[in-house]
Image (tube, rainbow, N blue to C red):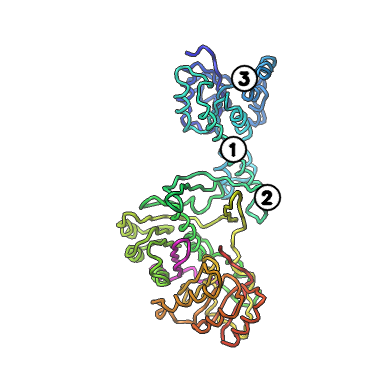
Amino acid sequence: MKTTKHRALISVYDKSGLLPLAAFLKDEGWEIISTGGTAKYLSDNKIVVTDISSITGFPECLDGRVKTLHPAIHAGLLAKRDKPEHMATLQELNIETIDLVCVNLYPFFEKAIESYEGKLNLDDTIEFIDIGGPSMLRSAAKNFKDVIVLSESGDYDSIMEALKGGKSPKDVDISQKRALAGKVFDLTSAYDAAIARYLLNTEDTSFPKYWPMSLEKKQNLRYGENGHQSAALYLSTGPLGCFASMQQLHGKELSYNNIRDLDLAWKAACAFGLPEAGVQPLGEDSVVKAGEAAGIKLESASNSLVCCAAIKHNTPCGLALGKTLNEAFVKAKACDPISIFGGIVACNTTVDADTAAKLHDIFLEIVAAPAFDDEALEILKKKKNLRIIKMTGAPVETHECISIDGGLLTQSADRTLLSKWEVVTKLAPPPELYKDMLFGMRAVTYAKSNAIVVVNNLAALGIGCGQTNRIWAAEQALERAAKNTIAEKYNTKPLVMASDAFFPFPDCVEAAAKAGIKAIIQPGGSVNDDQSIEACDKLGVAMVFTGARHFKH
């Protein structure tokens, strides 16, 4: 038994692993101070505790909102043991030191998610904002040289080992105490950021003075973009993005590059709706409004059609809709049957056996979908390393962030497909091409700028992207479309071209007309728009301006 008594303050919401720690401290001669439900839990398990009110001389009040916010607690935590003035003050005020704090917080992360999902109202959610817990943790962590602070149950065992045999907090290695203090501020910064995000409502287009990011590590990754780089996956604590629904059903562990490509593939597939979850295509409201303003009926492809997206090196190499997933995959693969090798395929509907058989025939890194038939799973699992991913959530993030050296760029997510539908040529596109034009505009949104997509029968026949000038992107897309082996089968309508940004010169129009393009959809806005319009009129091509640019750098 210890000859010098130390004191531990224990107040936890999550009581996992607590009893062994409390029993150890009791056996080592520590006095245990506790509060409310934790005190009752320990007492019921025959652990003698000192109630917090006997230390503060003040009862818990305001439904437990105030119980540890008292000088008798925080002075006992913050006093520097090697500073005589501090210790003299404690003696004068009859305050004893507290040498260990074990606290975890009210589950605001989880409750905020419930609130985002409409399951919990604002007032009830706010009640899960912990005040006393973070305050005690921060006080103890600031004075980590003298006070051991535990904010995670996973650290209980290592501290029990360090204190075994009557050792005092002074005997615990300073690097261990410092690391535990660092965990506290890591936790409280994420906790405060989650609260800030919830109260600031960053779902709108505002940008607060400090950008609140609350992310939790889900897993370490084998390596980063290259083998010599380390990496980890962090996900938002709320609102939850589509990766929160991710389940890996088979295959090797996901890599950094896999996750980046999967992110784009899933977003591209979901851009055409997620039928089984009732999610509409990307920017459908803007499509309807643009059509109404133009006095025409604009609508996306029927919800009876499903999407298949193929991605390689974070770039689309195939994208198509079909009456069946099998048809959509065949059309998507035909866009670039070479690049899809070693790529990722995402589907916005259940994968059936027929489609699985075709997927099995080529080397893929990942197949992602909201569900898989039993027979489809059996077929796909024959490939030992193929990662089979189930994702049921649609993309929800309202902002996009990119790291820069020492900072962050953030912007509102690109959710407006059209700002207008303005026919700028003498020839108007026939209504039967509207869906292809809208398909092309959605498809080009996910291709790297400069980006051009050639479309026919709701499929990308050719994609040109990542070029430093637009004519190269156009020529690339047109060349690939001309080589598309499935083009003749589905070439029942004139070809459509979509561009993510304006044409600075008439050269893209001229190349398009030469290749048989009959309708172009692009944002417009160039000082040379007139030249492109004149070229279209001269060559018999219809052109529509949307007023919404979709650069993707």
Looking at the picture, does residue 307 appear above or below residue 78? Answer: below
From the image, tell me which residue sits under label 2: 208
* Magenta span contains residue 323: yes
Select label 1 or label 3 by which is in front.
Answer: 3
Amino acid type of the residue tagged 3 in the rendering: Asp
Residue bearing the label numbered 3: 82
Q: CA distance from mark 1 to mark 3?
A: 27 Å
Work out which quarter of the rendered image holds the C terminus and state it.
Answer: bottom right
Residue 37 in sight: no
Q: Nearer the viewer, mark 2 or mark 3?
A: 3
Foreground residue among 92 and 127: 92
| 550 left or right of 230 in image | right
- The residues colored magenta run 299-328
Q: CA distance from mark 1 to mark 2?
A: 19 Å
Residue 357: % across, % down: 32, 64
The residue furthest front is: 228
The secondary element bearing badge 2 is classed as: loop
* 392 is higher (above) or lower (below) than 150: below
What residue is shown at x 40% (from left), y 68% (from top)? Answer: 329
Q: CA distance from mark 2 to mark 3?
A: 42 Å
- Disc 2 marks a residue whose amino acid type is Pro
Q: Earlier in the sequence, mark 2 or mark 3?
A: 3
> Residue 478: horizontal and vertical position, in percent?
48, 77
Local SS, label 1: helix
Q: Residue at x 65, y 78 (%)?
A: 528
In the picture of the structure, the residue carrying the numbered disc 1 is 188
Mark 1 residue crowding within 10 angstroms, few (<14) / some (14–19) / many (20+): some
Amino acid on which the number 1 mark rests in the picture: Thr
Q: Is residue 135 visible?
A: yes
Say how many tags the image has. Answer: 3
Mark 1 or 2 closer to N-term? 1
